Image (cartoon, helix red, strand yellow):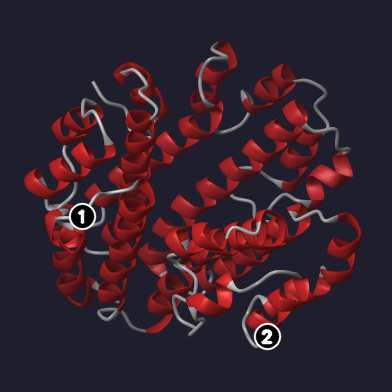
Amino acid sequence: MGMISYAGVNAKVKALFGKMLSEEDYNNLINQKSVQDIFDYLYQNTHYREYLEELAGVEIHRRQLERTLKKNFIRDFKAILRYLTGPIRDFFKFFLIKFEIEDLKMLLRTSLIEHDEEYLKNTLVYMGIYEDISLDRLTSINNYHDLLEVFKGTQYYDTLERFEERYMKDKNLFPIEMTLDFNYFIKLAQLVRRLRGEDYRIIRDLLGTQVDLLNIQWIYRTKRYYNLNTEEILNYTIPIHYRLSAKDLKNLSQSSQEEEIFNYLSKTDYDELFSPVAHDKSILFEKYFLSYLLKKAYHTKISGTSNVGVIISYTFIKEYEIRDIITVVEGVRYSLRSEDIKNYLIRDLK
């Protein structure tokens, strides 16, 4: 798709950008006293009114609000897909699957361990984005056999079936969840390689950075919280390399302490990014790298007037907006101080 081809879809996406929250909106939301107050503010003062109309006049709960926001994000993105053709459409169509995988991981934990059918009914949003999987069938899963029956014929079946015997022995969902993520990024990388020119460069830069940071985060967390050897750590890194090579990941995984990780990163292209984290242990690691990706997405949006930049930046920025709204809801719900809520947000507020 060239400049003319992107004109229509970029106009559509820019209109969606115009409906996003301002910094003033976030500060006002943080100062609300209840989930109902947050809903009322969004409904009365922002473009979210059109999405929240179905909930008007009823007592609002956190899960209802989250579900509605996520559902309408998918609706808007499917509208964007209608403007796209060829490899770029294939890429974005599959890109959405990451949200479905998050739902699937939650389904695994809730169905096989917690057995909370009501929670699933109120929470599952992305499951069945393209395939018709009924909510009733999903919430009726009680064991691994049920799980395989429901997902027979889907892209997830082979992975789930491969781990059946192992799960029945150790009841450990971790390798299943990691493999789902692993397979997703491998397929996504294949679709990225089909792109050309500016589209390839822009998407490779944003997603390549994301994968590098996910791998760094994974290695950091295993060193801090788990007792895994180098081979085990590397087995669960995403085998896609942008600014970090396979050798870099191996060296990071062999670090014996957190300080060694940051010392090594200081010799890579991510030196400037991780230098503050190395000197301030109060920084929330995941929030910090998500904040970096958000800023990078905004930069991509500014430079993407005649290419895919506007669309790919929208997917990141909108996802993070919804996550931040839910973070505010949780903070208000538990009566956190305004400054504490701000510290948990992906975006930086004044």
Q: What kind of element bears circle 1?
A: loop
Question: Residue 201: horizontal and vertical position, in percent?
Answer: 43, 59
Residue at the disc numbered 1? 58
Question: Residue 92: horizontal and vertical position, in percent?
Answer: 41, 71
Residue 333 picture quarter: top left
> The N terminus is located in which quarter?
bottom left
| Residue 343 seen in the current view | yes
> The C terminus is located in which quarter?
top left
Question: Residue 132: horizontal and vertical position, in percent?
Answer: 48, 85
Residue at the disc numbered 2? 152
Crowding at mark 1 (Cα within 10 Å: few <14, some 14-19, many 20+): few
The amino acid pointed to by label 1 is Val
The answer for how far apart the CA atoms under marks 1 and 2 are is: 38 Å
The amino acid pointed to by label 2 is Lys
- Which one is closest to the eye, mark 1 or mark 2? 1
Query: Residue placed at 51% from the left, 77% from the top?
Result: 136
Query: Residue 251, relative to residue 79: is it above or below?
Result: above
**In the rendered picture of this protein, how many numbered marks are placed on residues?**
2
Query: Residue 341, relative to residue 3: is it above or below?
Result: above
